[in-house]
Image (cartoon, helix red, strand yellow):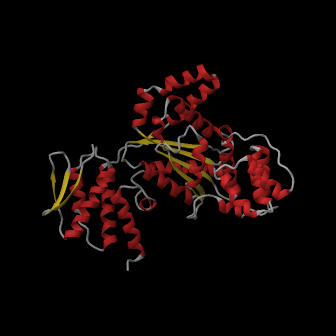
Amino acid sequence: MLQGEAVVERRVVEALRSGVPSRSVCQVFPMGRQDVLVRFNDILEDVGNNGSGPGLYVFSADYGEGKTHLLLAMARSAEDKNFVVSFLNLSKETPFDKLHKVYPKLVAGTNLPGSRQPGFERLLSGLKPGSHTAESLLAYVEENLHPKLYAVLRNYVEGSKVEENARLYEDLAGVFIGMAELKAIHRLNFGVPLSIRPFRVTSDIVDYFRFLNYLFRASGYAGWVILLDEVELLGKLGRTARAKAYQNIAQLTSDASLRHTVFVFSVASAFYTDVFDLRKDPEVLPRLVRDRLGESAGDAVARGIAVLGTQHRLAPLSQPEVDAILSEVIRIHSRAYGWPAPESAKEAVKKYFSNDVRLRSKIRAAVQYLDVAYLYGKEPSLTISPLNGMDIREDQNFFEETQES
Protein backbone atom coordinates (compact mmCIF):
# COMPACT_ATOMS: atom_id res chain seq x y z
CA MET A 1 0.00 0.00 0.00
CA LEU A 2 1.24 3.49 -0.84
CA GLN A 3 2.28 5.70 2.04
CA GLY A 4 0.28 8.89 2.52
CA GLU A 5 3.04 11.16 1.19
CA ALA A 6 3.44 9.10 -1.97
CA VAL A 7 -0.32 9.23 -2.56
CA VAL A 8 -0.28 13.03 -2.37
CA GLU A 9 2.71 13.28 -4.69
CA ARG A 10 1.14 10.93 -7.24
CA ARG A 11 -1.89 13.20 -7.26
CA VAL A 12 0.42 16.13 -7.93
CA VAL A 13 2.05 14.26 -10.82
CA GLU A 14 -1.36 13.35 -12.23
CA ALA A 15 -2.42 16.99 -12.09
CA LEU A 16 0.79 18.09 -13.81
CA ARG A 17 0.38 15.36 -16.42
CA SER A 18 -3.14 16.54 -17.26
CA GLY A 19 -2.20 20.21 -17.28
CA VAL A 20 -5.19 21.02 -15.05
CA PRO A 21 -4.38 23.38 -12.13
CA SER A 22 -5.15 22.01 -8.68
CA ARG A 23 -4.67 23.01 -5.07
CA SER A 24 -2.43 20.00 -4.46
CA VAL A 25 0.01 21.38 -7.03
CA CYS A 26 -0.13 24.84 -5.47
CA GLN A 27 1.13 23.43 -2.19
CA VAL A 28 4.51 22.72 -3.77
CA PHE A 29 4.63 24.98 -6.84
CA PRO A 30 4.56 28.74 -6.24
CA MET A 31 5.63 29.07 -9.91
CA GLY A 32 7.96 31.97 -9.19
CA ARG A 33 5.18 34.47 -8.41
CA GLN A 34 6.26 35.37 -4.89
CA ASP A 35 6.20 39.10 -5.67
CA VAL A 36 2.51 38.86 -6.58
CA LEU A 37 1.69 36.81 -3.49
CA VAL A 38 3.46 39.35 -1.29
CA ARG A 39 1.39 42.18 -2.76
CA PHE A 40 -1.78 40.11 -2.42
CA ASN A 41 -1.01 39.33 1.22
CA ASP A 42 -0.55 43.04 1.89
CA ILE A 43 -4.06 43.64 0.52
CA LEU A 44 -5.43 40.86 2.73
CA GLU A 45 -3.79 42.35 5.79
CA ASP A 46 -5.19 45.80 5.06
CA VAL A 47 -8.73 44.64 4.32
CA GLY A 48 -8.80 42.14 7.19
CA ASN A 49 -7.38 44.45 9.82
CA ASN A 50 -8.66 47.84 8.69
CA GLY A 51 -11.82 47.11 6.71
CA SER A 52 -10.42 49.18 3.86
CA GLY A 53 -12.14 47.20 1.11
CA PRO A 54 -13.22 46.46 -1.39
CA GLY A 55 -9.68 45.31 -2.05
CA LEU A 56 -8.66 44.82 -5.66
CA TYR A 57 -5.96 43.02 -7.62
CA VAL A 58 -6.02 42.52 -11.39
CA PHE A 59 -3.35 40.55 -13.23
CA SER A 60 -2.85 39.33 -16.78
CA ALA A 61 -0.65 36.79 -18.55
CA ASP A 62 -0.62 34.76 -21.73
CA TYR A 63 -2.47 31.46 -21.99
CA GLY A 64 -0.65 28.59 -20.32
CA GLU A 65 1.51 30.83 -18.12
CA GLY A 66 -0.05 29.90 -14.78
CA LYS A 67 -2.90 32.35 -14.19
CA THR A 68 -5.26 29.77 -12.70
CA HIS A 69 -2.41 28.23 -10.73
CA LEU A 70 -1.67 31.65 -9.24
CA LEU A 71 -5.33 32.11 -8.29
CA LEU A 72 -5.27 28.77 -6.48
CA ALA A 73 -2.11 29.82 -4.66
CA MET A 74 -3.93 33.02 -3.66
CA ALA A 75 -6.85 30.94 -2.42
CA ARG A 76 -4.55 28.92 -0.21
CA SER A 77 -2.88 32.05 1.13
CA ALA A 78 -6.24 33.68 1.87
CA GLU A 79 -7.56 30.61 3.69
CA ASP A 80 -4.39 30.53 5.78
CA LYS A 81 -5.24 34.09 6.81
CA ASN A 82 -8.80 33.06 7.78
CA PHE A 83 -10.59 34.48 4.75
CA VAL A 84 -13.57 32.81 3.15
CA VAL A 85 -12.68 32.16 -0.50
CA SER A 86 -14.95 32.01 -3.54
CA PHE A 87 -13.54 30.81 -6.87
CA LEU A 88 -15.42 31.34 -10.12
CA ASN A 89 -14.66 30.79 -13.80
CA LEU A 90 -16.59 33.18 -16.00
CA SER A 91 -18.44 31.37 -18.79
CA LYS A 92 -21.61 31.44 -20.87
CA GLU A 93 -23.47 30.21 -17.79
CA THR A 94 -21.96 32.93 -15.61
CA PRO A 95 -21.85 36.09 -17.74
CA PHE A 96 -20.77 39.06 -15.67
CA ASP A 97 -23.46 41.27 -17.13
CA LYS A 98 -26.00 39.21 -15.13
CA LEU A 99 -24.99 39.20 -11.47
CA HIS A 100 -28.05 37.17 -10.50
CA LYS A 101 -26.54 34.31 -12.53
CA VAL A 102 -23.04 34.91 -11.21
CA TYR A 103 -24.04 34.90 -7.54
CA PRO A 104 -25.29 31.29 -7.18
CA LYS A 105 -22.24 29.98 -9.06
CA LEU A 106 -20.07 32.05 -6.76
CA VAL A 107 -21.70 30.53 -3.68
CA ALA A 108 -21.21 27.04 -5.14
CA GLY A 109 -17.50 27.82 -5.36
CA THR A 110 -17.26 29.22 -1.81
CA ASN A 111 -15.22 27.48 0.86
CA LEU A 112 -14.94 28.34 4.53
CA PRO A 113 -11.39 27.91 5.89
CA GLY A 114 -10.89 24.32 6.97
CA SER A 115 -14.14 23.09 5.41
CA ARG A 116 -14.40 20.70 2.49
CA GLN A 117 -18.10 21.37 2.01
CA PRO A 118 -18.80 24.34 -0.28
CA GLY A 119 -21.30 27.00 0.72
CA PHE A 120 -22.01 28.76 3.99
CA GLU A 121 -24.95 26.80 5.42
CA ARG A 122 -22.89 25.78 8.44
CA LEU A 123 -22.73 29.43 9.51
CA LEU A 124 -26.50 29.88 9.34
CA SER A 125 -27.31 26.58 11.07
CA GLY A 126 -25.07 27.67 13.94
CA LEU A 127 -27.02 30.88 14.55
CA LYS A 128 -29.02 30.73 17.77
CA PRO A 129 -32.05 32.98 18.27
CA GLY A 130 -31.12 35.80 20.62
CA SER A 131 -27.37 35.27 20.29
CA HIS A 132 -25.14 38.29 19.72
CA THR A 133 -24.18 37.14 16.21
CA ALA A 134 -27.78 36.45 15.19
CA GLU A 135 -29.06 39.74 16.58
CA SER A 136 -26.23 41.71 14.97
CA LEU A 137 -26.81 40.07 11.60
CA LEU A 138 -30.57 40.56 11.71
CA ALA A 139 -30.17 44.21 12.69
CA TYR A 140 -27.70 44.85 9.86
CA VAL A 141 -29.91 43.20 7.25
CA GLU A 142 -33.05 44.96 8.46
CA GLU A 143 -31.42 48.39 8.43
CA ASN A 144 -29.34 48.15 5.27
CA LEU A 145 -30.62 45.53 2.83
CA HIS A 146 -33.79 44.70 0.92
CA PRO A 147 -36.66 43.63 3.23
CA LYS A 148 -36.84 40.29 1.47
CA LEU A 149 -33.44 39.28 2.83
CA TYR A 150 -34.53 40.24 6.33
CA ALA A 151 -37.69 38.14 5.97
CA VAL A 152 -35.71 35.15 4.70
CA LEU A 153 -33.07 35.44 7.44
CA ARG A 154 -35.58 36.02 10.25
CA ASN A 155 -37.63 33.01 9.18
CA TYR A 156 -34.46 30.91 9.10
CA VAL A 157 -33.18 32.01 12.51
CA GLU A 158 -36.40 32.52 14.49
CA GLY A 159 -39.00 30.47 12.64
CA SER A 160 -40.59 27.42 14.25
CA LYS A 161 -40.85 25.43 10.99
CA VAL A 162 -37.20 24.42 10.72
CA GLU A 163 -38.03 21.97 7.94
CA GLU A 164 -38.42 25.04 5.72
CA ASN A 165 -34.85 26.19 6.42
CA ALA A 166 -33.38 24.28 3.49
CA ARG A 167 -35.49 26.32 1.08
CA LEU A 168 -34.60 29.54 2.88
CA TYR A 169 -30.89 28.73 2.66
CA GLU A 170 -31.28 28.05 -1.05
CA ASP A 171 -32.59 31.57 -1.47
CA LEU A 172 -29.60 33.07 0.34
CA ALA A 173 -27.37 30.87 -1.84
CA GLY A 174 -28.92 32.25 -5.02
CA VAL A 175 -31.81 29.90 -5.84
CA PHE A 176 -34.26 32.68 -5.24
CA ILE A 177 -37.55 31.96 -3.53
CA GLY A 178 -40.79 33.32 -4.95
CA MET A 179 -42.62 35.94 -2.92
CA ALA A 180 -45.72 33.78 -2.58
CA GLU A 181 -43.71 30.90 -1.14
CA LEU A 182 -41.86 33.20 1.25
CA LYS A 183 -45.13 34.68 2.49
CA ALA A 184 -46.53 31.18 3.07
CA ILE A 185 -43.48 30.18 5.11
CA HIS A 186 -43.71 33.41 7.12
CA ARG A 187 -47.36 32.75 7.96
CA LEU A 188 -46.52 29.20 9.07
CA ASN A 189 -43.72 30.47 11.30
CA PHE A 190 -45.28 33.56 12.82
CA GLY A 191 -49.00 33.35 12.11
CA VAL A 192 -49.16 36.80 10.52
CA PRO A 193 -49.08 37.98 6.89
CA LEU A 194 -45.87 39.33 5.35
CA SER A 195 -46.00 42.58 3.43
CA ILE A 196 -42.84 43.83 1.72
CA ARG A 197 -41.98 45.77 -1.42
CA PRO A 198 -41.19 43.82 -4.57
CA PHE A 199 -37.75 42.29 -4.99
CA ARG A 200 -36.17 42.90 -8.40
CA VAL A 201 -33.39 40.39 -8.80
CA THR A 202 -31.43 42.25 -11.46
CA SER A 203 -31.19 45.48 -9.46
CA ASP A 204 -31.29 44.16 -5.88
CA ILE A 205 -28.85 41.25 -6.24
CA VAL A 206 -25.93 43.29 -4.87
CA ASP A 207 -27.60 43.13 -1.46
CA TYR A 208 -26.83 39.41 -1.42
CA PHE A 209 -23.12 40.21 -1.83
CA ARG A 210 -23.41 42.70 1.03
CA PHE A 211 -25.14 40.08 3.15
CA LEU A 212 -22.31 37.57 2.71
CA ASN A 213 -19.66 40.23 3.37
CA TYR A 214 -21.29 40.96 6.73
CA LEU A 215 -22.09 37.31 7.55
CA PHE A 216 -18.52 36.14 7.09
CA ARG A 217 -17.10 38.94 9.18
CA ALA A 218 -19.71 38.51 11.92
CA SER A 219 -18.92 34.79 12.00
CA GLY A 220 -15.32 35.46 12.96
CA TYR A 221 -13.58 35.34 9.59
CA ALA A 222 -11.15 37.98 8.41
CA GLY A 223 -13.22 38.66 5.32
CA TRP A 224 -14.14 37.36 1.89
CA VAL A 225 -11.92 36.85 -1.17
CA ILE A 226 -13.57 36.53 -4.59
CA LEU A 227 -11.30 35.05 -7.26
CA LEU A 228 -12.54 35.48 -10.83
CA ASP A 229 -10.82 33.51 -13.57
CA GLU A 230 -11.09 33.75 -17.36
CA VAL A 231 -12.30 37.34 -17.17
CA GLU A 232 -11.21 37.69 -20.80
CA LEU A 233 -14.48 35.95 -21.71
CA LEU A 234 -16.10 39.36 -21.28
CA GLY A 235 -14.86 39.85 -24.81
CA LYS A 236 -17.31 37.19 -26.02
CA LEU A 237 -20.24 39.33 -24.92
CA GLY A 238 -22.00 41.76 -27.20
CA ARG A 239 -21.40 45.48 -26.85
CA THR A 240 -24.44 46.11 -24.63
CA ALA A 241 -23.67 43.14 -22.38
CA ARG A 242 -20.01 44.19 -22.07
CA ALA A 243 -21.11 47.66 -21.01
CA LYS A 244 -23.32 46.16 -18.30
CA ALA A 245 -20.48 43.87 -17.17
CA TYR A 246 -18.18 46.89 -16.80
CA GLN A 247 -20.88 48.65 -14.79
CA ASN A 248 -21.15 45.62 -12.49
CA ILE A 249 -17.40 45.55 -11.99
CA ALA A 250 -17.47 49.24 -11.11
CA GLN A 251 -20.33 48.79 -8.65
CA LEU A 252 -18.87 45.82 -6.80
CA THR A 253 -15.32 47.11 -6.56
CA SER A 254 -16.40 50.51 -5.22
CA ASP A 255 -19.20 49.44 -2.85
CA ALA A 256 -18.34 50.73 0.61
CA SER A 257 -20.49 48.00 2.17
CA LEU A 258 -18.01 45.40 0.92
CA ARG A 259 -15.29 46.71 3.18
CA HIS A 260 -14.03 43.24 4.13
CA THR A 261 -14.08 41.82 0.59
CA VAL A 262 -11.22 41.45 -1.90
CA PHE A 263 -11.75 41.00 -5.65
CA VAL A 264 -9.10 39.39 -7.84
CA PHE A 265 -9.49 39.37 -11.63
CA SER A 266 -7.37 37.05 -13.79
CA VAL A 267 -7.32 38.15 -17.44
CA ALA A 268 -5.63 36.69 -20.51
CA SER A 269 -3.36 39.29 -22.09
CA ALA A 270 -5.09 38.93 -25.45
CA PHE A 271 -8.19 40.58 -23.97
CA TYR A 272 -6.47 43.95 -23.87
CA THR A 273 -5.40 43.72 -27.50
CA ASP A 274 -8.66 42.33 -28.84
CA VAL A 275 -11.15 44.33 -26.75
CA PHE A 276 -9.40 47.44 -25.46
CA ASP A 277 -7.24 48.18 -28.53
CA LEU A 278 -9.05 46.73 -31.54
CA ARG A 279 -12.65 47.26 -30.40
CA LYS A 280 -11.69 50.43 -28.52
CA ASP A 281 -13.96 49.75 -25.55
CA PRO A 282 -12.33 52.43 -23.34
CA GLU A 283 -13.08 55.14 -25.90
CA VAL A 284 -16.31 53.89 -27.48
CA LEU A 285 -18.48 52.24 -24.82
CA PRO A 286 -18.63 55.02 -22.18
CA ARG A 287 -19.62 57.51 -24.89
CA LEU A 288 -22.33 55.25 -26.32
CA VAL A 289 -23.80 54.56 -22.88
CA ARG A 290 -23.78 58.24 -21.95
CA ASP A 291 -25.71 59.03 -25.14
CA ARG A 292 -28.31 56.35 -24.45
CA LEU A 293 -28.59 56.13 -20.66
CA GLY A 294 -27.08 59.29 -19.27
CA GLU A 295 -23.88 60.58 -17.76
CA SER A 296 -23.81 58.43 -14.60
CA ALA A 297 -24.29 55.18 -16.52
CA GLY A 298 -21.49 56.06 -18.93
CA ASP A 299 -19.22 57.01 -16.04
CA ALA A 300 -19.86 53.61 -14.42
CA VAL A 301 -18.81 51.87 -17.65
CA ALA A 302 -15.63 53.95 -17.72
CA ARG A 303 -14.86 53.07 -14.08
CA GLY A 304 -15.31 49.36 -14.74
CA ILE A 305 -12.99 49.55 -17.74
CA ALA A 306 -10.48 51.45 -15.61
CA VAL A 307 -10.58 48.67 -12.98
CA LEU A 308 -9.53 46.07 -15.54
CA GLY A 309 -6.98 48.53 -16.88
CA THR A 310 -5.05 48.45 -13.58
CA GLN A 311 -3.74 44.98 -14.39
CA HIS A 312 -0.33 43.81 -13.33
CA ARG A 313 1.26 42.03 -16.29
CA LEU A 314 2.94 38.85 -15.06
CA ALA A 315 6.50 38.82 -16.30
CA PRO A 316 7.75 35.69 -18.05
CA LEU A 317 9.57 33.39 -15.68
CA SER A 318 13.34 33.55 -15.84
CA GLN A 319 15.34 30.50 -16.89
CA PRO A 320 16.52 29.85 -13.31
CA GLU A 321 12.87 29.92 -12.17
CA VAL A 322 11.87 27.47 -14.91
CA ASP A 323 14.85 25.27 -13.98
CA ALA A 324 13.73 25.25 -10.35
CA ILE A 325 10.22 24.22 -11.37
CA LEU A 326 11.48 21.39 -13.58
CA SER A 327 13.76 20.20 -10.79
CA GLU A 328 10.75 20.08 -8.51
CA VAL A 329 8.84 18.06 -11.12
CA ILE A 330 11.69 15.55 -11.19
CA ARG A 331 11.87 15.37 -7.40
CA ILE A 332 8.15 14.77 -6.99
CA HIS A 333 8.02 12.17 -9.77
CA SER A 334 10.91 10.36 -8.06
CA ARG A 335 9.21 10.32 -4.66
CA ALA A 336 5.78 9.48 -6.10
CA TYR A 337 7.01 6.30 -7.84
CA GLY A 338 10.00 5.43 -5.68
CA TRP A 339 12.69 5.62 -8.33
CA PRO A 340 15.72 7.78 -9.24
CA ALA A 341 14.10 10.07 -11.81
CA PRO A 342 16.77 11.33 -14.24
CA GLU A 343 17.85 14.95 -14.25
CA SER A 344 18.15 14.67 -18.03
CA ALA A 345 14.43 15.47 -18.27
CA LYS A 346 15.20 19.06 -17.40
CA GLU A 347 17.99 19.35 -19.94
CA ALA A 348 15.84 17.78 -22.66
CA VAL A 349 13.05 20.29 -22.11
CA LYS A 350 15.52 23.18 -22.10
CA LYS A 351 17.12 21.92 -25.32
CA TYR A 352 14.01 21.28 -27.37
CA PHE A 353 11.64 23.97 -26.12
CA SER A 354 12.36 27.61 -26.79
CA ASN A 355 11.89 30.28 -24.14
CA ASP A 356 8.58 31.46 -25.61
CA VAL A 357 6.90 28.05 -25.27
CA ARG A 358 4.25 27.98 -22.58
CA LEU A 359 5.29 26.85 -19.14
CA ARG A 360 2.42 24.37 -19.04
CA SER A 361 3.81 22.64 -22.14
CA LYS A 362 7.28 22.41 -20.64
CA ILE A 363 5.97 20.86 -17.44
CA ARG A 364 3.83 18.31 -19.26
CA ALA A 365 6.74 17.41 -21.53
CA ALA A 366 8.98 16.83 -18.51
CA VAL A 367 6.37 14.61 -16.86
CA GLN A 368 5.85 12.58 -20.04
CA TYR A 369 9.62 12.21 -20.48
CA LEU A 370 9.84 10.84 -16.94
CA ASP A 371 6.83 8.56 -17.48
CA VAL A 372 8.46 6.95 -20.51
CA ALA A 373 11.80 6.60 -18.72
CA TYR A 374 10.08 5.00 -15.73
CA LEU A 375 8.02 2.65 -17.90
CA TYR A 376 10.88 1.37 -20.10
CA GLY A 377 13.76 1.59 -17.65
CA LYS A 378 15.95 3.94 -19.66
CA GLU A 379 15.91 7.49 -20.83
CA PRO A 380 14.13 8.17 -24.15
CA SER A 381 15.70 9.88 -27.11
CA LEU A 382 14.20 13.03 -28.56
CA THR A 383 13.83 14.17 -32.15
CA ILE A 384 12.14 17.17 -33.72
CA SER A 385 9.38 16.21 -36.13
CA PRO A 386 8.83 17.96 -39.51
CA LEU A 387 5.75 19.66 -38.02
CA ASN A 388 7.86 21.33 -35.33
CA GLY A 389 6.64 18.88 -32.76
CA MET A 390 8.55 16.72 -30.33
CA ASP A 391 8.75 12.92 -30.35
CA ILE A 392 9.91 11.10 -27.27
CA ARG A 393 10.83 7.59 -28.36
CA GLU A 394 11.88 4.28 -26.89
CA ASP A 395 12.40 1.90 -29.82
CA GLN A 396 8.94 1.65 -31.47
CA ASN A 397 7.10 2.94 -28.39
CA PHE A 398 6.70 6.67 -28.55
CA PHE A 399 4.30 9.52 -27.99
CA GLU A 400 4.10 13.00 -29.40
CA GLU A 401 3.74 16.32 -27.68
CA THR A 402 3.11 19.10 -30.19
CA GLN A 403 5.11 22.17 -29.33
CA GLU A 404 2.86 25.18 -28.68
CA SER A 405 3.84 28.45 -30.19
- Residue furthest out toward the right: 192
Q: Position of residue 55 (x, y in %)?
A: 59, 44
> Would residue 140 be found to the left or right of residue 123 on screen?
right
Q: Position of residue 369 (x, y in %)?
A: 24, 61
Q: Position of residue 25 (x, y in %)?
A: 41, 60
> Would residue 152 be found to the left or right of residue 318 on screen?
right
Q: Position of residue 336 (x, y in %)?
A: 34, 70
In front of the other: 161 or 288:
161
Q: Quadrant of residue 160?
A: bottom right
Residue 44: tell me if it is visible: no
Residue at 69 percent across and 54 percent down: it is 215
> Would residue 237 be found to the left or right of residue 204 on screen?
left
Residue at 45 percent across and 36 percent down: it is 236
In the rendered view of the protein, which quadrant contains the N terminus?
A: bottom left
Above or below residue 392? Residue 266 is above
- Residue furthest out toward the top: 291
Above or below residue 151? Residue 121 is below
